[in-house]
Image (cartoon, rainbow, N blue to C red):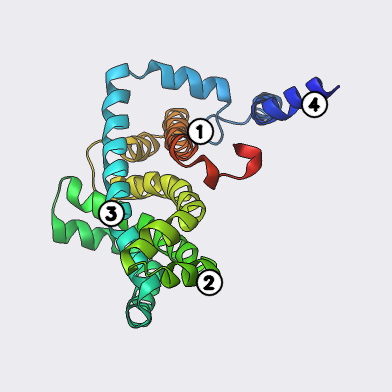
Amino acid sequence: MKNVLRLADRFAPLLAVIFVLAVWQVATVAFKIPSFLLPSPTRIVSDGWKVEWFIWANHIWATFRVAVMGYALAIAVAIPLAIGLAMSRLLSRTLYPMLVVIQSTPVVAVAPIIVVTLGSGDLPKVVITFLITFFPIVVSTTTGLLATPEELIELSRSLRAGRSREIFHIRLPFALPFLFSALKISTTLAVIGAVVAEFVAAENGLGFFIAFSTSFFKIPQAFSGLVILVMLSLVLFRLVGFIQKRFAPWSLPKSER
């Protein structure tokens, strides 16, 4: 019985996806829903299969490249900024409201301005991805740094540990669960940012492919691009989870170790 429950728990997500796809397929056939409104899963797969592999490779690489560059830039900026916000009350009071204002500004609205200002190429797309991605990393990392137990801080100060040792040996290790949670969330945001940028100005990428297919009413083909986008987000999400499990397993919940 325990083995059955263990298998059911392990394969529950896959079974749920299969069930949803089956209901979707049956509904589109039973109610004769036109493919330009809601294509069936089999139609999505067949139309996606008709696209040449090198076309898919070109679009996937374009989106993946922009998403990873924007994501890496967000990490490089957000973590030092979070350390500064956590360690300096003046910096926190000065910059945090500005960060909130930036995050509150719809990136979709300013994306055309960014493209016009920075020109064509990857740079404006990377900047748009960065703007969407970095805020959760800053907030979660700052929260983790500030959540370090005060007794650990007092102990380090009683042992005359410097500020750098306090940050890198006590606060950052304690903040890793918060940081990795933000990094996992930001992987999906990075892909979203890349797609938003491709909607505004691009000649390749999965976002461009979806917009192009939709403009010609090739809805099943557009759905196939959407499926690949979801798969790309899942791969990046799992990659961050693998890195956490490989290099910082103690930061995972006990059920995931």
Q: Amino acid at mark 4?
A: Leu
What residue is at 34 percent from the left and 35 percent from the top?
206
Q: Position of residue 188 (x, y in %)?
A: 44, 45
- Which amino acid, by three-letter code, is at mark 3? Ala
Residue at the disc numbered 2: 150
List the single residue furthest toward the right.
Answer: 1
Q: Is residue 62 left or right of residue 231?
A: left
User: What secondary structure is marked by label 1?
Assistant: loop
Visible residue check, residue 228 = yes
Asked whether, in this view, residue 150 is left or right of residue 62, the answer is right
Q: Mark 4, mark 1: which one is toward the viewer?
A: 4
Q: Earlier in the sequence, mark 1 or mark 3?
A: 1
49 up-or-down from 214: above or below: above
Q: CA distance from mark 4 to mark 1?
A: 41 Å
Earlier residue among tags 3 and 4 = 4
Between label 2 and label 4, give the one nearer the viewer.
2
**N-term-proximal mark, 2 vs 4:** 4
Residue to which mark 4 is pinned: 5
According to the image, label 1 marks what residue?
Answer: 36
**Percent x, y for residue 200?**
28, 51
Q: Secondary structure at mark 4?
A: helix
Residue 78, numbered label = none
Of 118 and 83, the residue lying toward us: 83
Residue at horizontal 51%, vertical 52%?
Answer: 177
**Mark 2 residue type:** Glu
Q: Amino acid at mark 1?
A: Phe
Marker disc for residue 76: 3
